[in-house]
Image (spheres, rainbow, N blue to C red):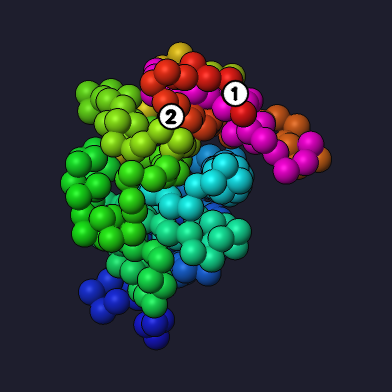
Amino acid sequence: MERPNWVSAEIDLERPSGARVCDYFLGGAHNFAVDRELAEIVSRMTPDIGDAMRANRAFLRRAVRFMGDQGIHQFLDLGSGIPTLGNVHEVAQRADPAARVVYVDVDPVAVSHSRMILDGDPRTAVVQADAREVESVLAAPETRRLLDLEQPVGVLILGLLHFIPDADDPAGIVKRLREAVCSGSFIALANVTHEDQPPEVIEAQKLSNQIDTPICLRSRSELLEQFDGLSLVDPGLVHIPLWRPDSPLYVDERPERFGVLGGVGRKDPEENRNGTAL
C-alpha cells in the first residue's frame, strides 16, 4: 500500500485504528480498508453507531458555532481523535480566521495523523496527553502557545467522558478545567446514557466491559453533576440532536436512539453564578 502524505513512517497500515474507524463513520477520507472492514463488523453489532457518531459531530459543530457567536475565539478539544471533516478548527476558523484550536488525544495514532494533517496551520496544535491529567494538558507548550487562559475559552469534551470510569472522577476532571478557565468560558459535555434506551441496547453497551476501555453509561442526574458550577445554556442537558438544531427538519424522529446526552455550560462571574440561560 502506498503511504499517504498524512501518515508518518512509524504507523502500521495493516492494523485498524479506532481513530480512523471513527473517521470512516463520519464520512472522512483518512481511513484504510482495514479500518472500514472493522467498522462494518461493529455496525452489524450496533447498527446505530455510525448515526450516533455523526450526531455527536453535528452537536460539536453547533456548539462551536454557538460559542463563536458568544465571542469565543480559542478552543480546547479533549479526546479529539483525528480532526477532519467539520471539526473544531474548520468551524471556528470559518467564522474567524484567527481562531485558535488545541486538540488533545492520548492515542498516538490519532496524534500522529493529526499533526501531519494540520502541519502548516500555525493556529492549531495537537497535544498527546491523558485528559485526566488536566494540569499537564494546560501546561503543554502547544497549549501555552495558543491559548490565553486569562481570556474566555471554549472547552469541548464530547467523545471522552464515557470512557472515564467513576473511579477517575469525571466530574472532578470537569471541575479542574472549569477552575482553570476564566469567567465567560464555555464547556460542552456529552456522555453515553442508559436513559430512554431499550434493554437490548443497554445489553450491547455492556459488552464494552470486556475491553480495555469500557463505556460508562450514566444517568441524567450523574451528568448534571458534571455541570456543577456552570450555568447550563438553553435547552439544557438533552439528547444531542435536540441541542439547538439548525432546523426542526434536521431532528431525528427518535433523538433518544443515539443514546447520548449533551449540553453546554457557561462559567459566570462569582456574583452571577446562577445567571440566566442564553
Total residue callouts: 2
Which residue reaches farthest front? 271
- Say left or right for 155 vs 275: left
| Residue 33, label in figure | none
Tell me the magenta residue range. Answer: 225-248
Q: Amino acid at mark 1?
A: Ala
Question: Label 1: few (<14), some or many (≥20) within 10 Å?
Answer: few
- Residue at (48%, 59%) from the top-left corner? 99
Which residue reaches farthest top? 221
Which residue reaches farthest bottom? 2
As rendered, which of 68 and 6 lies closer to the eye? 68
As rendered, which of 255 and 173 lies closer to the eye? 173
Q: Please identify the quadrant where the N terminus is shown.
A: bottom left
- Say left or right for 256 vs 101: right
Question: Label 2: few (<14), some or many (≥20) within 10 Å?
Answer: many
Q: Secondary structure under badge 2? A: loop
Examine the rendered structure and indicate whether residue 74 appears above or below residue 256: below
